[in-house]
Image (cartoon, grey):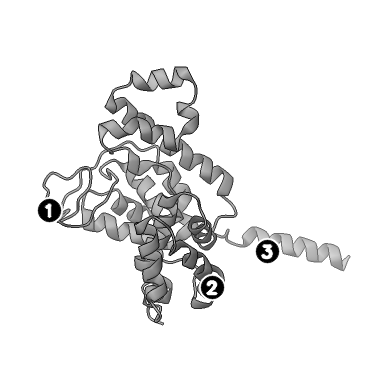
Amino acid sequence: MKRIAFIVLWTIVGLNMPAVAEVKIPDNLLNQFKSNDWPTVLAAKESIENMEAAGIPQLMTMLNDFTVRKLKNTGDLIYPGTRKFYGHGQILDYNIDEICIRAGWLLEDLAFQNFGFAGINIPDQELTDFIQYNYKETYSGEPNKQNLDNMSAGEKRKLIRSLSIKKAQEWWSRSSGNWNRLDALVESLQSADEKCQAKALFYIRNGKTQCTGLTKTFYQTRLESVIRELAKNDLKRISENAKLILMDMDFEWLELKSVNKGK
């Protein structure tokens, strides 16, 4: 009888307990990321990256938003939508005037992945080779090859955008539920894709956003040996970044990360 009473009491209490709110990107932060003011977009990107896995579902939804928001106040930013070239500045390979590509840019940086969003605006003569290398199924077979040969550069760019979105969606379908940024960092460093390796190395060297669990001890036990191997890589942008990390004996790169600020 006491057991029945306890179960009834717990049921009543449970019904009156507030549901645990799912962590989501706040609407005001999403709007800031979608704005046309470059400093606002950049600050919002950093805040969303700090959310790690929690922000990814909404970014996946944003991949279906083909709205164009032409950026203002870009200063020396050099990207495919640049109207003026000053000969110097930050270089970004993504046409982030398009909201779906802006979301893809954030996803790739957050997850250290290469879905292909940076390939949408490469020179016309490189588009077919990019599709062949990055989306082999789309290029395989004579009918597919002929179809690509008959496409205009604009049609190929739209195809790459569609394939990039599909690749990101398939990745999240496999990864959601057990994805975390620390494991993603390790996997990207060990990847056969040099773009993934470069993103991971660049993040370790210069990234300011959070990666939960990335500590000096974790680096020494899990990452250092991998980075030592990458320092021997034939590609300079891989080996040089790896060497610069190894040379930082004071772990200044780790102090840059949000999780360590103020400690």
Quarter of the figure that contains the N terminus: bottom right
Callout 1: SS: loop
Residue at figure coordinates x 46%, y 18% from the top left: 142
Please tell me whether mark 1 or mark 3 is closer to you in this view: 1
Q: Which residue is mark 1?
A: 87
Residue topped by disc 3: 13
Query: How far apart in space, not on screen, are marks 1 and 3 (Cα)?
Result: 65 Å
> Residue, x 44% and y 52% (percent of image)?
196
For label 2, the SS is helix
Which residue position is annotated with label 2?
218
Picture coordinates of residue 190, whole percent (x, y): 52, 57
Are the two marked residues, 2 and 3, in contact with CB atoms closer than 8 angstroms? Answer: no
Label 2 crowd (10 A; few <14 / some 14-19 / many >=20): few
* Front residue of 145 and 23: 145
Foreground tag (2 vs 3): 2
* Relative vertical location of residue 61 with respect to residue 227 in this rendering, above or below: above
Image position of 156 with respect to 165: above or below: above
Sequence-first tag of 2 and 3: 3
The amino acid pointed to by label 2 is Phe
**How many other residues sit within 10 Å of disc 3, few (<14), some (14-19) or many (≥20)?**
few
Distance of label 2 from label 1 (alpha carbons): 40 Å
Image quarter of the C terminus: bottom left
Decide: is 182 above or below 250: above
Query: Is residue 257 visible to the viewer in this orientation of the structure?
Result: no
For marks 2 and 1 on the same chain, the one whose residue lies earlier in the sequence: 1
Residue 113, percent from left and from top: 45, 50
Seen at 28% across and 47% down, the residue is 93
Mark 1 or mark 3, earlier in chain: 3
The residues bearing labels 2 and 3 have C-alpha atoms spaced at a distance of: 42 Å
Q: Quadrant of residue 96?
A: top left
Task: Give amino acid for label 1.
Answer: Gly
